[in-house]
Amino acid sequence: MSQSHDKSENITLKGKLSLAIEKYSYILLGLIIAVVFIVIGLLIYNSLQMKNLEKYTQQIESIQEDFENLVNLTDEDKLVSAKKEIEEKLNLLIDGGKKNYVLQRALFIRATMFFQNEDWDKSIEDFNLLADLFPNSYLAPIALINAAIAFEESGKIDEAIEEYNIVVNNYSSVSSEISNVYFSIGRLFEQKSDKSAALEAYNNLLDNFPDSNWTNLARSRIIYLESK
């Protein structure tokens, strides 16, 4: 009697186990199918992204070429028309662009074009936006230096010094223009008649870049200021 009960119980356990395996196998199969669809979706998405990036890269290269060819236009009306067309193309890329290489190139070209047109405020805005969005880009310190020059050209000396200081604080180890930046800070403080701050900037240049071409100029300014 006991053996018959054990056999019956074993059969029941086996049945339950089979049902459980069958039940969870459907769940597992469903998970596998879902993962497969997700992977396929990601592959399609990445493929589309790569195609779009390639398309926009070709566009920005074409715009860059058109921008560089502006110097060959001698007719004023054609020059104005060409600049307008370039700006419109850049606007489309910037307004609808994602945070990628194409966007930073587009911002840099548009900022440079504004700079050349002496539209200082727009130039500064684009250069600073580029540096904010892409702080690790090789273009970031260049953009900040250009923004500083634009501030200086528009007579905003304090803002120019602030931009230069951002470059010193964040890009001293990567920018080849840091010695020039130190000298520019000193020069601007001289314009403000702030002798102490100018000497500090020039001495920082001497201490950090003793072999720079700007060092001799800084040394001569130090001698001049200390003699006054």
Image (tube, grey):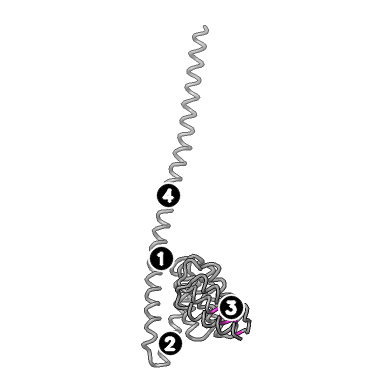
Residue at numbered disc 2: 81
Q: Residues within 10 Å of mark 1 (few under 14, many from 20)?
A: some
Residue at numbered disc 3: 199
The span from disc 2 to disc 3 (Cα, nearest Å) is: 47 Å
Q: Is residue 170 above or below residue 12?
A: below
| Residue drawn at 38 percent across, 86 percent down | 71
Mark 2 vs mark 3: in front: 3
Residue at numbered disc 1: 53
What span is in magenta? Answer: 184-191
User: Farthest front residue?
Assistant: 227
Question: Can you give x and y, in whole percent of width and height, for residue 140 in the image?
Answer: 49, 70
Task: Return the disc, 1 or 2, that comes first in the chain's sequence.
Answer: 1
Q: Amino acid at mark 2?
A: Ser
Residue at numbered disc 4: 39
| Residue drawn at 56 percent across, 71 percent down | 166
Question: Can you give x and y, in whole percent of width and height, for residue 146 in the image?
Answer: 50, 78
Task: Return the disc, 2 or 3, that comes first in the chain's sequence.
Answer: 2
Question: Can you give x and y, in whole percent of width and height, for residue 207 in the image?
Answer: 52, 71
Helix, strand, or loop for circle 2? helix
Q: Residues within 10 Å of mark 2 (few under 14, many from 20)?
A: few
Q: Is residue 165 magenta?
A: no
Q: Is residue 185 magenta?
A: yes
Mark 4 vs mark 1: in front: 1
Q: Is residue 226 left or right of residue 16?
A: right
